[in-house]
Image (cartoon, coloured by chain):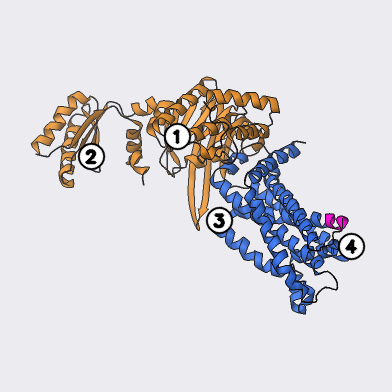
Chain colours: A orange, B blue
Amino acid sequence: MIVIEAIHLKKTFRHRNRIVEAVKDVSLDISKGEIFALLGPNGAGKTTTMRMLSTLIPIDEGQAYVAGYNVKTQSNMVRKHIGYVGQLGGSDPNATGWENLILAGRLYGLDRDTVKTEAKKLMDILELNEIIDRMPKTYSQGQKRRLELALGLIHRPDVLFLDEPTTGLDPDSRYNIWGYVEKLRAEGMTILLTTHYLEEADELANNLAIMDHGEIIAKGSPQELKNQISGDVIMVRSKCQRDQLENILSLINILENKDKALIRECLIKGETIYIYVDQGSAALPIILDIFKKQEINIDDISLSQPSLDDVFLKQTGRRLQDTGKE
Amino acid sequence: MKLFLEIALLFKRKALETIRQPVWIISGLITPLLYLIFFGPLLKGLNIADDNVLNLFLPGILSLLAFGSGMGAGWGVVWELQSGVIERFRVMPISRFSLMFGPVLRDVIIFIIQALFVILIGSIFGFDIHWAGSAVMLLLLSMMTAIISAWSASLGLIFQNIESLAAVVTGLQLPLTLLSGAMLPISVGPKWLQIIAHINPLYYTVEASRTLAKGTINSSAVLYAFLIIVPLTVLVLGWAAQVYRKAIS
């Protein structure tokens, strides 16, 4: 059953008299009980896509259906069935955690008794009992995020939107949040999250779409995407001259032309050569040999399974980890 | 029914916020009291009123208080945009009118409490209280507070930053106040000033407030003020709800 469906969504913003195409063409099908991640660098259009699907901003072009309702024409019905935890969080810093929860539940239309029962359940699950009587302005980032998750869940939504759920959290809190999200999915909730963390999409998502410049550049399960780059990745970093590195690249390219089974693809990014090979153990000695013959020092070498970053690199020529810092 | 519940819940949230920061209620009271104590006595020497100058001056001060009580709304909105509170409320299945009106109602109630306090203090200094007239006056001024509060909040949503908001709101505050005749009746001024003052809605509320404070409810000044302020309230509140409905990027 498809719970979130987006059909050719488009959104343009006017920013200082410049027209920015934040989302150019995004189509998604997300099934019930699935964790779906939108992965991409800042400014890729992930948040804009999510804000359109959650009725926060109007859809310029295209259609969207969430929980069986048309986002454009039945926004209030959509709102009833979704929970949304934004990047900013949105807990009221000047009311206690308890007051925040109760108010949210009451505004979602729960009666006084139901809201109290639900709040207590969530406090147990999200480990809020000790902090619930304090105001969020006294919370740590991790505590605050847990309360905000509870605020988005108080009405037991069918669909949960999480915008960068673990940004700014320490590793421990991040794993905790992953655990909660996994639990919610196991209970049948459909979850759409945005992230620029590779591991988050890799660990958590059943399916994901990699976005860049307002478009989806790859879609599938993490394994499917990584399988596009079958074999291993050899990364060799050397602080030598750029032309020396390019010389190496051309030598490897010759090998690639000779034996496609040995070396599939090869590219330079910064000081590093990325070599995609079928079998690392077979290719590694040959690569080392090339460097040795050219008398070029290797500063760093590694052999690994392809990651989602390699998928991103292959599609865009950039590394996701670098673009995030731009 | 649902609308009233939403408004009540959102009003309670903002009211609690105020109760926890009582310094704002007190600082809001200080300005009118300072005017009353340090500016009021100066008027006695000016011979602008036949009998008790405070009966003329106190309604003006209350009008300023009504104006000031609503002005800060936009600051709160910008703050809550930054913390994501407004965004969180906007994805809820609640009316955009309640979202806008809850905080407005808080400003109105706080104004009424402060105004009653100023009236009581004023009576110690010699202001003659006419309760019926004063009640109608507070109703009129409450609408003024609601207009200003909804307007300021909407500007906060539109600009989304303190700088632009402050420039517009405080930039308009002084001319609107001066042209309202809140400090001294416009009628003591030249004809051209009186003509300009007529485009300022605040002018009508000040004029009506003076009449009402004297206990005269049935007068043309009061009628004009309500004829202007009631539609203006509907218009501004409707517009403000529309701003909440619209996109915030």
Q: How far apart are marks 3 and 1 (CA)?
A: 29 Å
Which one is in front in this view, the residue at disc 4 or the one at disc 2? 4
Q: What stretch is highlighted in magenta?
A: B125-136
- Please identify, in this view, whether the residue under mark 2 or under mark 3 is nearer the observer: 3
Local SS, label 4: loop
In the rendered image of this protein, does residue B166 appear above or below residue B197?
Answer: above
Does mark 3 fall on the same chain as mark 2?
Answer: no
Q: What's the residue type where badge 2 is placed?
A: Thr
* Amino acid of disc 3: Ile
Name the residue type under label 4: Thr
Mark 1 belongs to which subunit?
A
Residue hosting label 3 = B162
A128 or A88, nearer to the observer: A128
Label 3 CA crowd tier, 10 Å (few <14, some 14–19, many 20+): some
- For label 1, the SS is loop
Q: Position of residue A1 (x, y in %)?
A: 56, 23
Residue linked to disc 2: A272
Q: Where is residue A31 shown, x and y percent of the image?
A: 53, 25
Asked if both marks, 2 and 1, belong to the same chain, the answer given is: yes
Which residue bears the numbered disc 4?
B216
| Residue A228 position by quadrant | top left
Pick whichever of labels 3 and 4 is earlier in the sequence.
3
Mark closer to the chain start, 2 or 1: 1
Residues packed near mark 1 inside 10 Å, few (<14), some (14 to 19) or many (20 plus)? many
**Protein chain holding label 2:** A
Give residue A169's quadrant in the image.
top left
The residue closer to the viewer here, B201 or A159, is B201
